[in-house]
Each structure stands twice: as C-alpha cells, then as structure tokens.
C-alpha cells in the first residue's frame, strides 16, 4: 500500500482492542505502527473468557455502542482471514444480576435440556440468548494484527513507551526504548497501562485495574455446547474440548487464590455436568481489566493536547470490533460517532 501522505498513527497496545484499532485504521489507509511493551495479547486479552454478549443489567449508558457489538464482529469475520467466532448462544439462570439483551428469550426445562443435554439438573427456566458467542481472544488478536500488517502496518513488540514528544500542544512522536517514532496521532489502547500513558500527556484518567479469575481445564469434548452462566459456574468449551471458566476475584486469602478457585470450580462443574469427572485444571490466573471509575468506556480525544486519542474499556473483547470501526472513522475520516458520546475522556478532565 502507498503510504505517501498517509496519516502516521501509533497505536500503543497489542491486545484485542489495539489490534482491532490497527486493522481498522490501516484499512482506511493510515500508516499504522503498533507498539507493545510485552508480547501480543500478553495482557488481559490472554486471560479473557471472551464471551461476546450485549447483555446489561439496568440502564445502559452505552446501549447504542453495545448494541452494535455483535454485528461488528460478524462483519470482521468476513474481512479478516483466520478470525472465527463460535455463535453458539448462551444460557443464563440463577445469577440474579438482571442482565438481559434485546434478543433474550425465556425457555423452559425441556428446551434447556435439548440445548445442554449434559446438565444434571436443568433449571425450571433460563434466559437463552441465541445470538451470542465466544472467540479465542489471543487467536483473534493475532489474526487482526496479521490483517493490519497485510495492509502495511508495523508491529513492534517488547518495546515499552517512555514518553511523548509534543510541539505547540500537538503530539509529534512516541519515545520508546528503541528510539523515537514520529506520529501525527497516538492512540492509547494499553489496557490498565492507559492511565499512566495519559498522565505523561497531562491527563489524569481514573482507570483502575479490576481483577478477575480465568480458568482453563482439560476436558472431554461435548460437555458444553454453548455458554452456561449460572449461580454455580460460568463455562464454555472450545472446539478441542478445552473448558474455559471465569470467576469473580473475591480477595487475597489463600482459599481465594486462582489455584484454589480452580479446584473449587472444578468440583462445581463436576456436580453440574454429566461426564465431567475427568476434567483437570490446566491454567489458573488473574486478569486485570481496565475499569473506568464510572464503569463507562473512555474513548475519544484528550482535550489538553492535540493528536492523542484514548481507548480504555471493559468489556474489551465485546467492544473491540465496534470500537475499532467507530474510532477509526473519527480518527481518519473525522466522522464523530454519536454512539461514543457517553465515553469521552473530557467527562473526567473538566476544569
């Protein structure tokens, strides 16, 4: 691709959000460089349950944004080689968190048993959301970055950012351990590291690290067909049989450490699923999600300095595709996206 005269954009962060941004920006003709302090998907992307859902409990300030998430992922599936989402639907019951989506259907026990025949004790009813799915977040990140590189993007891993060069209140470059990268625009998409990067540009963003536990088990294939979210477990199964589970982080005591949680969750899974006796823990770890203070994503330009755009959010996997699409339109085409209005960094930075 001919990049002569193209806008030079540095995306900081090679998780799934940064990868989506890189692909969408490159597809619009930008000269993109992705800079990552560690490896690809080495942050919370690598420990994500990766459930693509549009459910929300109560009033949703980003309903317009969340509502486009599934369609955006379906669009990317047609565009990016190797990007696959398993649209197998989800069952929720007994969680009492009130999450629903526009496509939610209440189904009875007989229907539940047909969808998930290995459940030992199907509930009387459940919420079925047939449009939802899941993906391998690490594989998806690699696929998006490979597609961006095919469009001319450069990816630099193990390259921490030291600071920025600014001239006349406009970002002109990114200082890294490997030297200066000149830029017309920088996009901060470094997960929990986004706040410290913004601080270097004079912006104080209240984004904290919210821990969650991610578990992976060796398991016989076919135990779970879709996603099951219940009072006892939140699980799904990959095509090779690997079972994935997610748990809330409840404290630092020994019984709440990931390894202990893995054993406790395994016991719950065995109790809930016929044929699950042979499951064995394979991985247990904590993922640190970037959580803005008000729970709403932080997406948009920093008001203090020109040429700096922020993308920090939870849930990152759910929103990565739609945010990449809309943010690239704002950055390259200058087209403001109304769906991002509630997300602007300026809400935290008003004088």
Image (cartoon, rainbow, N blue to C red):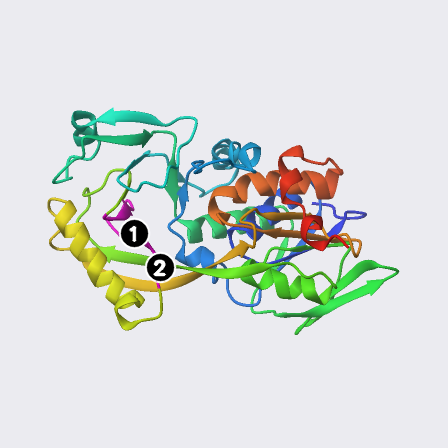
Q: CA distance from mark 2 to mark 1?
A: 11 Å
Against 77, residue 186 (above or below) is: below
Task: List the residue tagged with mark 1.
Answer: 244
**Residue 73 shown left or right of residue 255 in the figure:** right
Binning the other alpha carbons within 10 Å of mark 1 as few (below 14), some (14 to 19) or many (20 upward) gives many
For discs 2 and 1, the disc positioned in front in the rendered view: 2
Q: Are marks 2 and 1 in contact (CB under 8 Å)?
A: no
| Mark 1: secondary structure | strand
Q: In which quadrant is the C terminus drawn?
A: bottom right
Q: Nearer the viewer, residue 229 or 219?
A: 229
Quarter holding residue 62: top right
Q: Nearer the viewer, residue 133 or 271?
A: 271
Kindly identify the residue that appears in the image at 69 percent across and 65 percent down: 199
Binning the other alpha carbons within 10 Å of mark 2 as few (below 14), some (14 to 19) or many (20 upward) gives many
Q: Position of residue 67 (x, y in %)?
A: 51, 32
Kindly identify the residue that appears in the image at 53 percent across and 67 percent down: 38
Task: List the residue tagged with mark 2.
Answer: 213
Kindly identify the residue that appears in the image at 65 percent across and 42 percent down: 327
Q: Nearer the viewer, residue 4 or 330?
A: 330
Q: Is residue 263 magenta?
A: no
- Write down the region rendered in magenta: 232-250
């Amino acid at each position: 691709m001919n990049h002569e005269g193209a806008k030079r954009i540095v995306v900081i962060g090679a998780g799934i959000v940064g990868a989506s941004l890189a692909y969408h920006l490159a597809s619009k003709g930008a000269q993109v460089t992705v800079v990552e302090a560690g490896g690809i998907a080495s942050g919370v992307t690598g420990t994500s349950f990766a459930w693509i859902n549009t459910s929300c409990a109560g009033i949703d300030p980003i309903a317009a944004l969340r509502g486009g998430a599934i369609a955006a992922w379906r669009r990317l599936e047609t565009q990016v080689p190797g990007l696959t989402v398993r649209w197998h639907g989800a069952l929720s019951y007994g969680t009492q968190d009130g999450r629903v989506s526009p496509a939610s259907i209440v189904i009875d026990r007989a229907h539940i048993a047909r969808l998930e025949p290995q459940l030992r004790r199907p509930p009387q009813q459940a919420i079925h959301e047939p449009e939802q799915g899941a993906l391998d977040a690490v594989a998806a990140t690699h696929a998006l970055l490979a597609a961006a590189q095919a469009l001319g993007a450069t990816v630099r891993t193990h390259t921490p950012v030291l600071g920025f060069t600014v001239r006349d209140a406009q970002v002109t470059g990114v200082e890294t351990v490997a030297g200066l990268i000149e830029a017309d625009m920088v996009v901060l998409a470094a997960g929990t590291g986004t706040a410290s990067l913004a601080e270097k540009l004079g912006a104080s963003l209240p984004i904290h690290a919210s821990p969650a536990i991610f578990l992976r088990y060796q398991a016989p294939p076919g135990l779970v067909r879709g996603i099951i979210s219940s009072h006892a477990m939140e699980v799904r199964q990959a095509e090779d049989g690997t079972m994935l589970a997610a748990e809330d982080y409840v404290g630092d005591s020994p019984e709440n450490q990931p390894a202990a949680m893995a054993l406790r969750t395994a016991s719950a899974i065995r109790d809930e699923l016929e044929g699950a006796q042979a499951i064995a823990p394979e991985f247990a770890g904590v993922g640190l999600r970037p959580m803005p203070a008000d729970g709403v994503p932080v997406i948009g330009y920093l008001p203090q300095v020109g040429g700096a755009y922020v993308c920090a959010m939870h849930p990152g996997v759910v929103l990565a595709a739609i945010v990449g699409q809309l943010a690239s339109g704002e950055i390259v085409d200058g087209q403001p996206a109304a769906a991002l209005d509630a997300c602007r960094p300026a809400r935290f930075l008003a004088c």
